[in-house]
Image (cartoon, grey):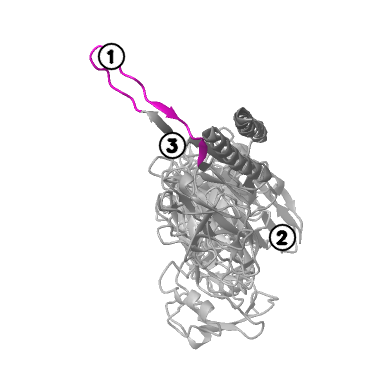
Amino acid sequence: MMRSLWSGVSGLNAHQIAMDVEANNIANVNTVGFKYSRTNFQNLLSQTVKSATAPQGDLGGKNSLQIGLGTSVSAVETMFKQGSIQNTDKNTDMAINGDGFFVVSGDGGKTYRYTRAGDFTFDANGNFVDPNGYIVQGWLADPETHTIDTASGVKPISIPPGLTTPANPTSKIAIKANLNSGDHITEMDGTRTTVDQTADINGLYNANGEKIQLTPDVDKITLAIDANNDGTISSTEVYTFTYGTSQTDTDRKFTTIKDLLDEINAIIKDPTGTTPASEYQVYLNGNGQIVDPQNRIKTEDTLSSTNTILENIFKALDGPATSTESMKAVQNSFIGADDVGELFNANGDAFNLEDGQGITVNINGLGETRKFIYQQTPINETEGCGTATGKYQPTNPITSDSMEGLHWTYDSNRERAFFNTNQYIEFTLSDGSTVSYTYGKDFQTIADLCCLLQNDITNRNLDDTIKFENGKITETNDVITGVQVYDSAGNAASTTALQNLQNIFEPLGSGTSTNEFLKNDVYYFHDIQDLAYIWQIAVDDSGDPLNSTTGNSGIVSINDDGQLTIKNTSSNSFNINIGGYPDEEKDNQLFTDAFSPINGSVAAGGTAISQAMNAAVHTTSIDVFDSLGSKHTLTLHFRKTHTSENPNDPTVWKWYAEVPAPSTLDQPAYGYVKFNPDGSINSYNPPSLIFNPNNGSSTGQAIQLDFGTMGKFDGITSFEAPSATSGQTQDGYPGGDLQQLVVDQTGTVIGVFTNGRSYSLAQVAIAKFVNNEGLMSEGGTLFSASPNSGEPIIGTAGTGGRGSIQPSSLEMSNVDLSRSLTQLIVIQRGFQANSKTITTSDQMLNTLLQLKQ
């Protein structure tokens, strides 16, 4: 009877413990990271009244007779079921999704505690702590590289308040863009010469990127010029030219390149009187170089200047038909003059000039129609494929046509043979009469002369037909018995030029044809500076006193809008007539139309302007940073210069870079990008720029350029699509202050700074145990390791079976109220039933006591 009492008591005790456990579960239903516990019961040792016996003979075995002595609590188990994860608005909250525990320490890392509650924050000293003040353990990032070595031991996570990050100077720029390879463009810029001859020399650069800086009326240059072309220099042939406003071509002053060239060319004379100015005058070529065709400037004699850069430019003139160092213009630094064949009209349509196409130009006073013919091969410099020729005209004159002016003719020895104004020719006819015709009054071209002669022969009833064919004047019968040319004073063939002309005509007086007339009216051009120059010499030659009585003069230049402009600086107007070349069927109509506005009369002091001629361009800008964190805008200008003709001939875009003053770029700050036929990048150069901020920060800052991988499409491409920049990056940034801290799924604490940069500052460690149920609860949602939990295996979240971290979230208690409330009922009924066991046993004992009575 007493056994039942004690069994009831043990049941009450056990269920009281279960009630305590369940009450604790319910109390912590809202405790972050709490894991509920479960009470397990076990029966106590039973009293054996009879032992079991084995079967013997005919008698079967008997089971033992045992009476239980009650129950006890065998274990209170913590259930580490995953709790639900709730998003929060706190950046430093963390929840573990999966197995593992945060590691915290309250004694500097000597002992560790473990928790699932991730409601962490930073204290006043920058320690990453839980609500108990325990510091979260993990790994700190290297302050220089911002990398985290998780192979090292864990340490308390502490991030100093007011953390700053220093500025990082830009060391690399990567650009993704397309440069339009098509025949129609929308992004374009007016064509430019390498150096405009009307540009002020002050502010230009030499080929090394050194700036020419001149002071008006102070800086000078002294040149020895062989004025008479006799190969010697006299004391009177040393000239000093002063930088300053020029009024005339003989005041020895200059501001622009043209001023200086005009001063030099006014000194140079043609002693024979047979060489056009265009063949001996010093000029500026398409590469921005001053060229001295006949070596008239003697640099070895008394060359000096108050400006070393200007002196060195002229020092390169050391032989016949040589040129100086390049002078460059800052507007299109070092890209060079545009290839005219690569240009587009005002509507963005490509000229696509082919070899042999061009325009015809006739100017009043020129005395001939000149042909300006495009050639793909550069004339003054090598570019793309091909070799520079250095010649604007054919090596030898070619057979004349009937419209050739007799001021620009040559004989079979390639010597000039020409008429001057008021010189004349006399023909003796078979009837004894003579006819004479004055150049510039009666005739100008060979066709004019043939027409006059035919009319006079016909009027005299002489049977003869005058023709011009295969470069010769011919007659069908020997009507012409003598020919003589005279100068304006009536002297027969008084000059070399007239004698040469006499030699051409003379065979007609004793036969049926003259010798061959040759001409030199073809001028080649490749780039826009070539074209501007041959236009300039056409204007100059139209005012040559050997041929013109009007004295035409003008300045030809390319303006900022890419238009060829002809400014009439003479006191009279002159007409310009332009046509296509070689003819209406084979000329390039788009190119011819570009010059149509120039057709007509140019008034004195007026200007004729062509349509705009444009280059395909693209411009992109990117901000770069110096060592102080100051921002500078780096602008890259791309310009198409060569179109591929075959797979071995890449398409070329040139580029140059610029930065605002006072910053500078070391030269070369320009280069090229070449493309394969499929539009992928072929090569580019140079690979880097040297940047000088000039604001107290470090100078000589190297910036690597990344335009893409050779043969791939991961950088700059050249497809038939509008030019556009699709992406660009650089690795520089200014200094910044810590603005906020955020955590990612690996438990990495990331600092977000005011300069927009984000860096890893630390990473939270996660501990894993072989037996989580073996952990000892320490209160405050903390656990400690026990002999039965195993040693902690510490690592990073998401590795080795550890769960991932959900940032800005907390793991809620895993207490299930419905289970807990149900469990209360079960515990209550068990407790009530055990109490009934005791009261029933008590009643039975009372009954037993009543038997004595």
Magenta-colored stretch includes residue 61: yes
Q: Is residue 205 visible?
A: yes
Give the residue drawn at x 45%, y 50%: 377
The answer to which image quadrant residue 63 occupies is top left
**Mark 3 near mark 1, Cβ–Cβ under 8 Å?**
no
Task: Give amino acid for label 2.
Answer: Asn
Above-or-below relation of 625 to 830 = below
* The N terminus lies in quadrant: top right
Task: Give amino acid for label 1.
Answer: Leu
Q: Which residues are magenta?
A: 51-74
* The C terminus lies in quadrant: top right
Image location (x, y in percent) of residue 698: 54, 75
Above-or-below relation of 7 to 32 = above
Pointer 1 local density, CA inside 10 Å: few below 14, some 14–19, many at least 20: few
Residue bearing the label numbered 2: 568
Give the residue at the far left of this rendering: 57
Pointer 2 or 3: first along the chain: 3
Residue bearing the label numbered 3: 45
Query: Judging from the image, what secondary structure is the residue with disc 1 in?
Result: loop
Give the residue at the far bottom of this rendering: 235
Q: CA distance from mark 2 to mark 3?
A: 128 Å
Magenta-colored stretch includes residue 71: yes
Image location (x, y in percent) of residue 485: 53, 56
Task: Give amino acid for label 3.
Answer: Leu
Q: Main secondary structure of the magenta part?
A: loop
